[in-house]
Amino acid sequence: MMNRRKSFALRVSLAIASTLIIVGGIGSFFYAKNHINKSNDIKKHDIYFTSNHKNKRTIEEIARNKKSIVLIKTSDESIGSGIIISDKGYILTSYHVIKGITKYSAFFQGKDNSMGQEAPLDLIGFDEEKDIALLKLKTTSPEHGYIPIGNSNNVKEGEKIITISSPQGIINTISDGIISGIRNEENIKYLQITAPISEGSSGGALMNMKGELIGIITFKAADGENLNFALSSRDIINFLESNMRNNKDEAGYILSNSGSTQIDSKDLEELDPWELTLARNEIYARHGYIFRNEELRKYFQTKKWYKPRENFSDEDLNEIEKDNIKFILMYEEMIK
């Protein structure tokens, strides 16, 4: 009788243990399904990612995005912020941060919360009206990550937000606030926020409580208190898509403002003599050179990126010469 009881108890114990294992496994599955970022939460585009996260995050979790925010410093000592939006090293910033400057670098936050590693940047495209520019790191690292872009059309007034930027050069300062207004000016959508900003904040990230980028910090009203504005992610995506469609036609043959050539000797073989002339002279046009040749002058005046200027520093001339040498070497390779 005792043996039967023991056998029965053993069978019950095994049944309970099996049930617990199965239930625990199912529970773990559903927990993972609901709490871990699913692959379909993030959608990859050519030069950026979009996100459709379902769950909100804590401020501490969102603050980890600071590894994907950089301080931008120009050759004239101006400062701003930038947002890495791709694993290919593409960075968004406000155009006014780099306007009229030919050299600029990104600084990542160091271990002691000061400016750390410096990384040179290339200019890929910009929209002066929207005050936005697309830059690219010359070298990338997976450790920097990226911030996916969210949908600003879902933003509501009163919604909590987080900003990360470098006000007054204090790298990766994290602030919070709310959406205090949604403004449309000449078909450009701005998100008005209460989070404080100052010089150096321009180009910084405005995120919702899911950690998605919903805007880029753009400007503040000089005559008001805490009247701060960010360009919406709707306009950011429109800019990026337009830039990808028009890059080749609008930017010409050399896409980088710092002379980082996007063509090689094989590409040159496909150009006719006039196109070769344009490609060669775009090196000078990118630096604002004013052409005496009427045909060249008229051609480059049709390009939005062309900003003619009268004076050049020795540093500018050295950069032009370096770019010119690159082109000559490619041309020589082509005619071998």
Image (cartoon, rainbow, N blue to C red):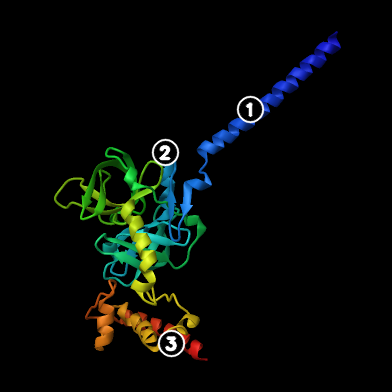
**Disc number lying in front (2 or 3):** 3
- Residue 161 makes an appearance in the image: yes
Quadrant position of the N terminus in the picture? top right
Circle 1 sits in a helix, a strand or a loop, which is it?
helix
Residue assigned mark 2: 58
Which mark, residue 328? 3
- Check disc 3 and give the amino acid type: Ile
Residue assigned mark 1: 23
Seen in the picture, residue 74 relative to 192 is either above or below; the reply is below
Rounded to the nearest whole Å, what is the CA distance between mark 1 and mark 3? Answer: 70 Å
Q: 10 Å neighbourhood of mark 1: few (<14), some, or many (≥20)?
A: few
Residue 261 percent coordinates (x, y): 43, 76
Circle 2 sits in a helix, a strand or a loop, which is it?
loop
Q: Residue at x 22, y 50 (%)?
A: 184
Q: Residue at x 36, y 43 (%)?
A: 208
Q: 10 Å neighbourhood of mark 2: few (<14), some, or many (≥20)?
A: few
Rounded to the nearest whole Å, what is the CA distance between mark 2 and mark 3? Answer: 54 Å
Q: Residue at x 70, y 24 (%)?
A: 17
